[in-house]
Amino acid sequence: MALGILWAAAMLPSPVTGQIPAQGPPPAQTPAPPNNPRARLGLRDAPVTNVSVDGSEAMFATMCALLAAGFEADVSSENWTPMRAQLRDRMQHQEGPAVDAVREFYKKHELADAGAMLSQYIWFGLVSGPAPKFTPTLRRDELPPEVIALEGFSEILSAYYVEQHIGRLWVQVQPVYNHEIDEIHDAVSQIVFVATNYLRQLSNPGDPRTFTIIVEPLVGRITNVRNFQDHYAIVLSGSADVPVDVVRHAFLHFLLDPLPLQYPHVIAVKRPLYDVATRAPRLTPDLRDDLPSYFSECLVRAVELKLKRMSPGEREAAIDNDDTDGYILVRPLFKALASFEGAEPSMKLYFPDMVRTIDVNAEVKRAQTVKFAPETGAPKQGDTAAEQVARTRKPQPTTIPNDSGAIADLTEGERRIAEKNPRAAETSFQRVLAKYPDQPRAWYGIGLVALLDRDAIRAKEVFGRLTTGEHAATQDPLVLTWSHIYLARIYDDEGQPEQAKTEYQAALAVNGGPEQAKQAAQKGLAAFGAEKRSERP
């Protein structure tokens, strides 16, 4: 590989997308996750990917226990599905020590707000491991607060599950669940197909991030959207009324949320707009101190406007509403998407360039003229299609300094690298190093400059500094992973295959490294294997 083109993969984000099995050729089979009830029961199932529609035995058992404890005991079942109504009646008449323990636990932890009460147990069902233990799949420090509030419920649910033969009941209701899953699958397939095609995202079943739609008729007609770390989930009651807009919104978050986290220095330049937005009374509270999440929400809304069938007037009215609600980045992002549509790279590659097209000064002036709408009251308790969103964001490790000037210089240097202007890029990175002599992102930029200059000696020196010794970028997985890869490619060009393979293997061993980089390392190692095979007589 020619040294002069090695820079092309620099500073790329990791792939974040996935598709349900209906899209494209089926991926390689992988072991079924422990909480996949249909696989465990030997029932039909599609190849596993990181986007799925399925039932959950843990969620089913949790809802059975909740109904047995008296949840919604006084609610009319007139509009319920027959199965839900019959199961509530059955659970309410259950008897036994474990049932008594469930009811006692429920009373001790009961909340005045029925919606908040249900939310706690839905969280519990989502993070629970398989029956019969239902041990949480996350460490305690990773659990949502709602689950911690139900500490001790796993043991109680386990005893209830065994005593009341919930596993046997779960098998009996499978035909109902399978029918609903099949019906929902088609609608979700279309959402996934349209969104991934617009963003030009490729399927990556090996991605540890997951997007799951759990079918659970016992929750009723309430759409529950959850985001915990790298796992996104929606709980739906069935196929009768799939909330397409809600599912699409959640799936776009799944695709786009990693990008602001991957490029904090790129979005940081737009912070003056965010500072104006935080004054909007209607802005969601958890977005007031979370710029990456705010940026992601605005980007999702902008993409939605592209995907929805709307007249120009309806679209403009929607953008006006976003402005008055505080989502003032939607308008410039919607405009910037036009440049993305005319380009070739996927969104995960084009994102930095698209963001840079936004004129912050002009947008701040415009935003200051927006009259924000007054705060409105909370949703009524009778609403049956409420979207409940919870964000638990895992911070992206980075070494970028909290310095607007340094961030601007890093951003400028990256732009110049993309333009193949090594001298201007070096000037920007050197300004950062003048203030922060050991700054890994700036040194990484200098390494890319050396690659553009075809200076292998200098490139090896810089990337070697970033991978070994006291200055190694151990706190910045992106820099560390790509530095190993560039060293590997240089060694390969120099005819040192063993050193190249060692660097590729080191890149794969970096914890938290970008998926794009890991794929590049795997491809590099595979090339050595292919060469060996071709040499055989």
Image: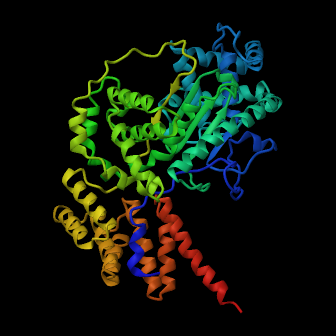
Give the residue at x 52% y 48%.
198
Give the residue at x 80% y 41%.
41
Residue 396: in sight, yes or no?
no
Looking at the image, residue 490 sits to the left or right of residue 204; the answer is: left
Q: Quadrant of residue 72?
A: top right
Give the residue at x 64% y 39%.
188
Question: Which residue is more in the foreground, 248 or 163?
Answer: 248
Looking at the picture, how far across and down is residue 287, in whole percent?
Answer: 36, 33
Q: As displayed, is residue 94 above or below residue 230?
A: above
Tell me the quarter of the image containing the C terminus. bottom right
Identify the colour scheme used. Answer: rainbow
Looking at the picture, how far across and down is residue 298, in whole percent?
Answer: 39, 38
Badge count:
0
Q: As displayed, is residue 404 above or below residue 535?
A: above
Looking at the picture, how far across and down is residue 148, in whole percent?
Answer: 51, 30
Q: Quadrant of residue 431?
A: bottom left
Looking at the picture, how far across and down is residue 199, in whole percent?
Answer: 50, 50
Determine the residue located farthest toward the front in the rendered image.
Answer: 312
Q: As displayed, is residue 308 above or below residue 113?
A: below
Give the residue at x 34% y 77%.
451
Residue 362: in sight, yes or no?
yes
Looking at the image, residue 268 sits to the left or right of residue 535; the answer is: left
